[in-house]
Image (spheres, rainbow, N blue to C red):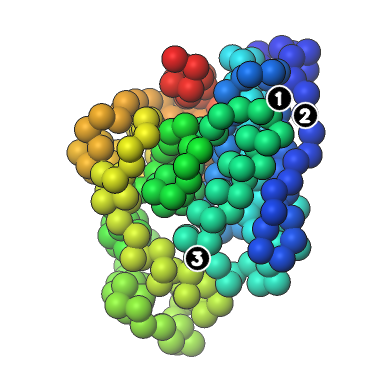
């Protein structure tokens, strides 16, 4: 439904913002003069501007979200993180980064978008880990209209990781090692992964441990409590990674926020009509499935009202 209108309504172009060593790169979907602009901040790991990553996610949720929002008169800029994909030149080592530095990049994007689009402020949408980045950026960026937290953590990442590991019975053989690794990282200590299961070696790889240590210091609920701008919190009832407890924690910390729960939406913003986990995960690799229509409506209403 979105695609035919999108083709007629939108101007799509490459955009950039200053990064530490080179430019950050993104895609602007322009709904026209004076349209509100939403900056889409990606989730964890090597997730690109479309919401895909080489670890098996090809659902293109950010691209589809941008195509949906432009039909509602909302422009978007979706971005590659520093050191990755189109933003590869921005930093020599994509792993040598912190949440705070990602938030600095958000500030750079906000300024670049304001200048290009002649808007007074920019809405910042953070998906998953990107929600924490949006919360940190909102503490500092003068020209943020407000923030939109979609499938975003409301508790410290260490607590969420513990919950995720314990929720899957298949993790029983690696559970003790995982719990030990999380506890050490929370204390700011590095973890020796040499004797761990290969899956844990990837998750807690030495190259990303400094990032994890920094991430684990962030308390999304406390950050949300300090946001003075409008906040929209959207969670999905079939999200396998972020639970209702996270949206509840954010809402409790920021009682002025608008809170929307979409019962059928999963972590990659798609509708899932069954509780079957395999069917849910299957949407992670299917860009033909549109993003949830209510998600598009709620975001558009929030930034245009």
Q: Residues within 10 Å of mark 1 (few under 14, many from 20)?
A: many
User: Can I make out residue 205 in this image?
Assistant: yes
From the top left corner, tell me how far across and down residue 134 is, in percent: 46, 46
Q: Is residue 30 above or below residue 243?
A: above
Q: Residues within 10 Å of mark 3 (few under 14, many from 20)?
A: some
Q: Residue at x 79, y 33 (%)?
A: 13
From the top left corner, tell me how far across and down residue 48 is, in percent: 65, 49
Marks 3 and 1 sit apart, C-alpha to C-alpha, by: 30 Å
Classify the position of the C terminus by image quarter: top left
From the top left corner, tell me how far across and down residue 74 is, in percent: 60, 21
Q: Is residue 185 above or below residue 163?
A: below
Sequence-first disc among 2 and 3: 2
Please report contact status of discs 2 and 1: CB closer than 8 Å, yes or no.
Answer: yes
Along the viewing direction, whichever of 92 and 298 lies nearer the viewer: 92
Q: Is residue 228 above or below residue 136?
A: above
Please report contact status of discs 3 and 1: CB closer than 8 Å, yes or no.
Answer: no
Q: Residue at x 55, y 48 (%)?
A: 107
User: Can I make out residue 84 in this image?
Assistant: no
- The tag on residue 98 is 3
Q: Which residue is mark 2?
A: 12
Sequence-first disc among 2 and 1: 2
Q: What SS does tag 3 mark?
A: loop
Marks 2 and 1 sit apart, C-alpha to C-alpha, by: 6 Å
Q: Residue at x 36, y 65 (%)?
A: 216
Q: What SS does tag 1 mark?
A: strand
Res 116 → quadrant: top right
Q: Which residue is mark 1?
A: 30
Marks 2 and 3 sit apart, C-alpha to C-alpha, by: 30 Å
Sequence-first disc among 3 and 1: 1
Q: Is residue 126 above or below residue 146?
A: below
162 to the left or right of 4: left
**Marker count (numbered):** 3
């Amino acid at each position: 439904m979105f695609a035919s209108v999108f083709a007629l309504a939108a101007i799509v172009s490459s955009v950039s913002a200053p990064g530490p060593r080179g430019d950050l790169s993104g895609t602007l979907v322009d709904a026209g003069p004076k349209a509100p602009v939403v900056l889409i901040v990606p989730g964890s790991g090597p997730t690109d501007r479309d919401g895909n990553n080489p670890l098996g996610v090809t659902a293109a949720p950010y691209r589809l979200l941008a195509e949906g929002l432009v039909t509602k008169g909302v422009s978007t800029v979706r971005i590659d993180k520093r050191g990755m994909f189109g933003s590869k030149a921005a930093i020599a080592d994509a792993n040598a980064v912190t949440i705070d530095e990602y938030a600095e990049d958000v500030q750079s994007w906000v300024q670049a978008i304001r200048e290009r689009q002649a808007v007074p402020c920019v809405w910042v949408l953070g998906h998953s880990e990107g929600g924490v980045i949006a919360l940190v950026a909102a503490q500092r960026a003068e020209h943020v209209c407000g923030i939109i937290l979609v499938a975003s953590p409301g508790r410290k990442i260490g607590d969420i990781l513990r919950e995720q590991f314990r929720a899957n019975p298949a993790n029983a053989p690696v559970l003790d090692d995982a719990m030990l690794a999380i506890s050490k990282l929370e204390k700011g200590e590095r973890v020796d992964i040499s004797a761990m299961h290969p899956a844990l070696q990837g998750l807690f790889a030495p190259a990303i441990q400094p990032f994890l240590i920094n991430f684990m210091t962030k308390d999304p609920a406390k950050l949300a409590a300090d946001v003075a701008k409008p906040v929209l919190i959207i969670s999905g009832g079939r999200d396998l990674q972020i639970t209702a407890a996270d949206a509840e924690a954010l809402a409790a910390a920021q009682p002025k926020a608008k809170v929307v729960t979409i019962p059928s939406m999963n972590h990659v913003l798609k509708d899932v009509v069954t509780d079957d986990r395999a069917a849910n995960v299957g949407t992670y690799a299917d860009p033909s499935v549109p993003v949830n229509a209510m998600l598009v409506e709620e975001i558009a209403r929030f930034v245009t009202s």
